[in-house]
Image (spheres, helix red, strand yellow):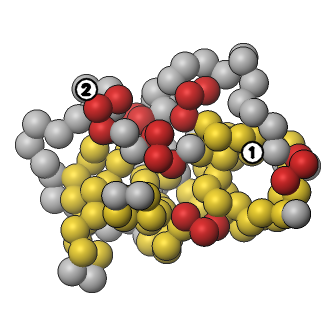
Amino acid sequence: MSKQVCTFYLENQIYGLYVLQVREVLRCQELTTIPLAPGAVRGLLNLRGSIVTTVDLRRRLGLPPDESGEPATNVVAQTATGLVSLLVDRIGDVVEVEAEALEPPPGVLPEPLRSLIANVCKLPTGLLLILNLERAMELDAFPA
């Protein structure tokens, strides 16, 4: 049985979310900042009347800030508690992966990254890291 994964990039690494979790992909949107919010929370997005928390996925995963100057892309995803927008460098493709090809994250991945990855899958273009969306959005675990 295969699963579809919506892929995106942070630096030169390919990440993904299961397609069923993704609502839409948007170009860079205007955000309203939230005073005293955790550092990874970039602000709030008004998405057709719905208020959506926007998370800088680079910061959440412990990656350095993007120095390219290119505008980030918003991947709007559904969590158990509602919609969330993830800021990523750029969007990739939707890829089909076989369930047998999914592996647990390797021990060589550094924390906090390893704990936020649900599965990995080898692609011809590199290793796909599939995000554990629920764990990645646990606000009490966000870096300050």
Numbered circle sitting on residue 128: 1
Secondary structure beneath dot 1 equals strand
Say whether residue 130 is visible. yes
Q: Residue at x 51, y 48 (%)?
A: 133
Mark 2 Cα within 10 Å, few/some/many (few <14, many 20+)?
few
- Give the quadrant of the N terminus: bottom right
Q: Residue furthest left?
A: 35
Relative image position of residue 62 (x, y in whole percent): 46, 27
Identified by mark 2, the residue type is Ala
Q: Quadrant of residue 115?
A: top right
Mark 1 Cα within 10 Å, few/some/many (few <14, many 20+)?
many
Q: Considering only vertical position in the picture, is 63 above or below 32?
A: above
Choose the circle earlier in sequence order: 2 or 1: 1
Identified by mark 1, the residue type is Leu
Residue, disc 2: 144
Q: Quadrant of residue 3?
A: bottom right
Q: CA distance from mark 2 to mark 1?
A: 27 Å
Relative image position of residue 75 (x, y in whole percent): 48, 62
Q: Considering only vertical position in the picture, is 73 above or below 14?
A: below
Q: Is residue 23 left or right of residue 3?
A: left
Q: Considering only vertical position in the picture, is 97 above or below 11?
A: below
Secondary structure beneath dot 2 equals loop
Numbered circle sitting on residue 24: none
Closest to the observer: 45 or 2?
2
Mark 2 vs 1: CB contact within 8 A: no
Relative image position of residue 90 (x, y in whole percent): 56, 57
Q: Is residue 72 left or right of residue 107?
A: left
Q: Quadrant of residue 80?
A: bottom left
Relative image position of residue 109 (x, y in whole percent): 67, 22
